[in-house]
Structures are given as C-alpha cells and as structure tokens.
Image (tube, rainbow, N blue to C red):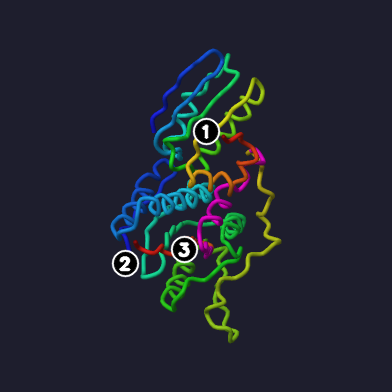
Amino acid sequence: MQSDVVTVTPANIAPALELVERTVTYIGYPREFGERMRLMAEELIGAIRFVLEETSATLWVNTDQTNMEIHLRLEGLLSDAARRKLVDISKCRCNEPPKGLFSRIGAFFSDAFMSDAAEYVPLFIDDGEGMGSYAMPLSLLAEDWEPQKRTEPAELRDVEANLLRGLADDVTVCARPSQAELTVIKKLPEKH
Amino acid sequence: MTIAKETSGNTLTVRLDGRLDTITSPDLEQALSDLAGVAHLVLDFAGISYISSAGLRVLLALQKNMGRQGDMVVRHVDPMVMEVLEMSGFVDILTIE
C-alpha cells in the first residue's frame, strides 16, 4: 500500500510527519510504533536539511506484509559534495540503485533530462555489467568537495543520521546528479 | 506541548507535557531563555513520550547554560525517550534521575 505523497519544505515538515503517523494508525499499529516511525521521518528530514533549501522534496510511505518504508525524494541539481553527504546517511554508506528495471530506466531519463547538460555524464556504461551498476561511486577527488564547516557543538554532530541509523532496520540512499531518494525501512511489529 | 514552570528559591522546576520535536522545541527554548538567578533546573519529563534531535539541541543548550551557573537534572524519563538519549550519547551528558 502506498500513502499519499506530501511536499516537504524546510518551513513546514508537519504534514509529512502527520502522514507517517496517520499511515501507521490506518494499518492498525499502535501509537508507540507511529511515534517511532514519525521520529524516523523527522530525523530523516533533519539529516537532509542542508539540501532541502535547494531542492524540492516529497515524502510518502510504502507498506507491505513485513515492512514499512518512508521514502523521501529530492529533485534538483545536487553537487557531488551534497550527494556524498546524502550517501553518508545510509546504513551501508553506499549509493544504492533503485530496485526494478523500470525504476532504473526512469532514473536514467530523469538524469539525462534534468542534469546540467554541460556537466552531465551518462550513468549507464554498457560494459556488460548491465544497468544495475549505473549508480556510480562518487569521486573522492571531486573539485567541489570541501570539509563540512562545523558550526555545531561536537555532541550534536550527525545526531540526526545517528538516530536514524539506530532506529531503522535499514537506510538506503540513491543519489544521482538531479535526484536523490532516501528510504528508511522498518520491520512491522507483530500485531497483538 | 505544555510547559509549566514552578520556582522555589533558586530552583526552577519545569514540567513538560507532549512532544519535544522540531515543531515544539522553539517554545521550550523561548520559555527558558532567561535563567538568571536559577541555580538548579529540574526538567520533569513525566509527560514527554517523544523527543527528537531538535529537542536534544535545546537540552544541550540548557545543560551548557546551567553548567556555568549551577546544575540541571532531567527526571521521569520515558523508555522511548531514554532510548533516544542512549542512542545519541546524551545519557553521558545529562544528569538523569
């Protein structure tokens, strides 16, 4: 089941948090689980706040028999540095391609049409490895990379991402030049 | 979130009820922006079942502020809130009773 899709803006994240909680209630899980999912959504949004001002963001929830997933999609040109920071949020710290052939084809066209034409590098390399490898590792020598400026106390460094990784069963990130999707996965508890 | 303050001598007890999150933490920050004359700050979390990193930010600022003029304790912490405090390492920063 997929929920409605809501827009997330830095000034108003309440509709997204309410959507997550409402979805949990709708499928019959207790308030405590709803609060836990809400917290994950809040930390997810908090962790990507650094790009939220420059991209448009949407959030929705997918539920199947075993898992609940919170999806946050960012659309707009993303710098290499921003993509690297997004990837750091994931549990495995890697750039995972979306599942399914159509998602990958969609991602290809999305990249081709939405990227800065002067900088666009096709992500499909027909070297026999197939399209699954299109989510290329980000270059460690990217020109626009600079160390993150520390303006927060050390105690709060990466606190959102740390909480997110601690609460979620998995956090995956697929970051491309023009679009990124972060997915938080949590196993559904047993219904009593 | 509701914030109820009670002063006894140089001790300020603040009872919180609701969620301490991105939406409500500015209210707590504002309510406790002036702690002049307070030597002991007690945050009663009996009514708090939810805290996010935004709430942790406010707690850290209060802790640092009170560290200069006295002390701060957090009481009656809910299990889910405690889980967040443990996960974030705040159990080592705050005095929790």
Q: Quadrant of the C terminus of chain A?
A: bottom left
Disc 3: host chain: A
Q: Are marks 1 and 3 in contact (CB under 8 Å)?
A: no
Disc 1: host chain: B
Disc 2: host chain: A
Residue A185: numbered disc: 3
Judging by the rendered image, the residue that carries numbered circle 2 is: A1
Three-letter code for the amino acid on which mark 1 is drawn? Arg
Q: Nearer the viewer, mark 1 or mark 2?
A: 1
Residue B75: numbered disc: 1
Three-letter code for the amino acid on which mark 3 is drawn? Ile
Residue B53: percent from left, percent from top: 52, 43
Q: Nearer the viewer, residue B89 or A175?
A: B89
Give the extent of the magenta segment.
A153-176
Decide whether residue A173 is among the magenta residues: yes
Please identify the residue farthest to the left as the structure is shown. Answer: A26
Report the residue at 47% width, 50% height from top.
A45
Disc 2 or 3, which lies upstream in sequence?
2
The vertical placement of A57 against B91, above or below, is: below
Choose top left, top right, bottom left or bottom right for residue B59.
top right
